[in-house]
């Protein structure tokens, strides 16, 4: 007979509004108060388990105990990821779809992405020299939209760039269903899916011939394990699940710039040290600043973990932000300190800004390598290839907003290129 321990429980009827009111630190605060990596609460009118820390993350990514289907709230799914995408799949279907995504992540393809991104940075930097000031976050979104579409084999006309950038940004900026702007997100999702669906149809009927190594080609012709072509609507969703996250890296770039401004001693190390210091800085931005607050799954069976009983078909939330700020894992967790990654003992469950576990078979974000590559390129530009002034502005960010950003979105003035000879590459 197994012995069960009473799981720590948050009292009260429903805590959904508290989660929104307190934001990113909500789950970590409760875990610290209860001194636990798991507790029970009530969210969206239903019982929910909340997991955090390294051991909690390892449990959460055990696919024999959890599924993703129907875990994400429908309103969020409709805008952020689209319906029937890889994030909502389990088992063999997920494994098959994930392989499709990972096939794009070869070193050669990542290098091609880097080259495209550098070229668009050069072009934008030249334009900024004639402007009084720029809002970095808005400019980087456009740079990343151009880069992502070209890398993915998605044709994008110049007159379409601003609208497409805005619509892609709406998918991650306007996901809160209680926000009046939510309808903008749903409108953008429909418009973008219709656009990509037409491109998939054109690829399949021979009107459009993207390079064979590109997202649009690979996803248009992908067949499942029984040889059936992916549904056109789903193919459109998945193409956007490549492009949209690349544009969303603009959030990290805004925080990267903020860190350079607020931690000048750390910025100085990037000039005098090599690529490892860049990697430390990028990883600390991903750990320290808020991005994904949490992930959701549903238990697939009754089981016991550390003496605590888990019931089948129960919503389970993983505290991503809190795990990346967990004082049990990170010394001085609330300090920005890139050198902590110098002797970091790498674990797939302690550092989880884009999910944990295995990239190929698990639910860790397939685009994590793209994120790191993009952040390194952008960091190099900000440190070594641009000079700029930083006017007085509001660099605070709101931890109750999902996703959050520096309030000013990072304003630069007097932007100049420090390596104008690179014009010859345009």
Image (cartoon, rainbow, N blue to C red):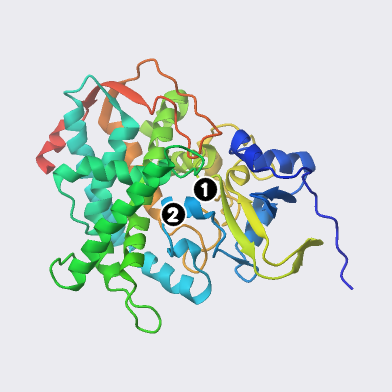
Quadrant (top left, top right, bottom left, bottom right) of the N terminus: bottom right
In the image, residue 323 above or below residue 380? below
How would you rate the neighbour count of disc 2 (Cα within 10 Å): few for under 14, some for 14-19, many for 20 or more?
some
Residue at (44%, 20%) from the top-left corner? Answer: 394
Residue 379 image position (x, y, % from top left): 35, 37
Numbered tag placed on residue 353 in the rendering: 1
Quadrant position of residue 154 = bottom left
Residue 338 image position (x, y, % from top left): 51, 37
The residue most toward the left is 424
Numbered tag placed on residue 78 in the rendering: 2
In the image, residue 48 above or below residue 415? below
How would you rate the neighbour count of disc 1 (Cα within 10 Å): few for under 14, some for 14-19, many for 20 or more?
many
Depth check, front residue: 101 or 109 = 101
Residue at (55%, 63%) from the top-left corner? Answer: 68
56 relative to 167 in the view: left or right: right
Depth check, front residue: 3 or 76 = 76
Question: Are the residues flagged by discs 1 and 2 in contact, CB closer than 8 Å?
Answer: no
Disc 1 on helix, strand or loop?
loop
136 relative to 181 in the view: left or right: left
Quadrant (top left, top right, bottom left, bottom right) of the C terminus: top left
Q: Could one spot residue 136 in this view of the protein? A: yes
393 relative to 331 in the view: left or right: left
| Alpha carbons under labels 1 and 2: distance apart | 22 Å
Disc 2 on helix, strand or loop?
helix
């Amino acid at each position: 007979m197994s012995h069960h321990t009473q799981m720590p429980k948050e009292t009260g009827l429903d805590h959904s509004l508290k989660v929104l009111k307190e934001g990113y630190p909500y789950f970590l605060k409760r875990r610290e108060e209860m001194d636990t990596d798991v507790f029970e609460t009530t969210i969206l009118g239903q019982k929910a388990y909340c997991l955090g820390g390294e051991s909690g993350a390892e449990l959460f990514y055990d696919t024999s105990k959890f599924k993703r289907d129907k875990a994400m709230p429908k309103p969020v799914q409709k805008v952020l990821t689209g319906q029937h995408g890889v994030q909502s799949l389990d088992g063999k279907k997920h494994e098959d779809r994930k392989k499709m995504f990972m096939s794009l992540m070869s070193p050669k393809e990542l290098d091609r992405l880097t080259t495209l991104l550098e070229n668009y940075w050069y072009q934008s930097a030249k334009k900024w020299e004639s402007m009084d000031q720029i809002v970095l976050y808005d400019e980087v979104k456009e740079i990343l939209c151009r880069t992502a579409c070209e890398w993915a084999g998605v044709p994008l006309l110049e007159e379409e760039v601003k609208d497409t950038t805005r619509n892609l940004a709406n998918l991650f900026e306007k996901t809160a269903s209680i926000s009046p702007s939510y309808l903008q997100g749903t409108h953008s999702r429909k418009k973008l899916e219709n656009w990509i669906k037409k491109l998939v149809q054109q690829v399949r009927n021979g009107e459009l011939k993207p390079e064979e190594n590109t997202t649009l080609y690979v996803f248009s012709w992908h067949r499942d394990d029984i040889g059936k072509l992916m549904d056109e609507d789903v193919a459109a969703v998945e193409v956007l699940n490549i492009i949209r996250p690349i544009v969303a890296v603009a959030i990290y770039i805004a925080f990267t710039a903020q860190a350079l401004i607020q931690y000048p001693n750390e910025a100085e190390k990037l000039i005098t040290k090599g690529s490892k210091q860049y990697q430390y800085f990028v990883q600390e931005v991903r750990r320290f600043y808020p991005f994904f607050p949490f992930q959701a799954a549903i238990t697939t069976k009754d089981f016991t973990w550390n003496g605590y009983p888990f019931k089948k078909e129960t919503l389970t939330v993983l505290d991503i932000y809190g795990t990346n700020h967990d004082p049990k894992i990170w010394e001085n967790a609330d300090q920005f300190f890139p050198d902590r990654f110098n002797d970091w003992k790498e674990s797939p469950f302690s550092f989880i800004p884009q999910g944990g576990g295995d990239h190929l078979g698990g639910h860790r974000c397939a685009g994590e390598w793209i994120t790191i590559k993009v952040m390194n390129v952008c960091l190099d530009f900000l440190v070594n290839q641009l000079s700029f002034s930083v006017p007085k502005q509001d660099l605070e960010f709101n931890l109750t907003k999902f996703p959050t950003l520096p309030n000013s979105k990072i304003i630069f003035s007097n932007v100049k290129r420090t390596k104008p000879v690179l014009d010859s590459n345009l």
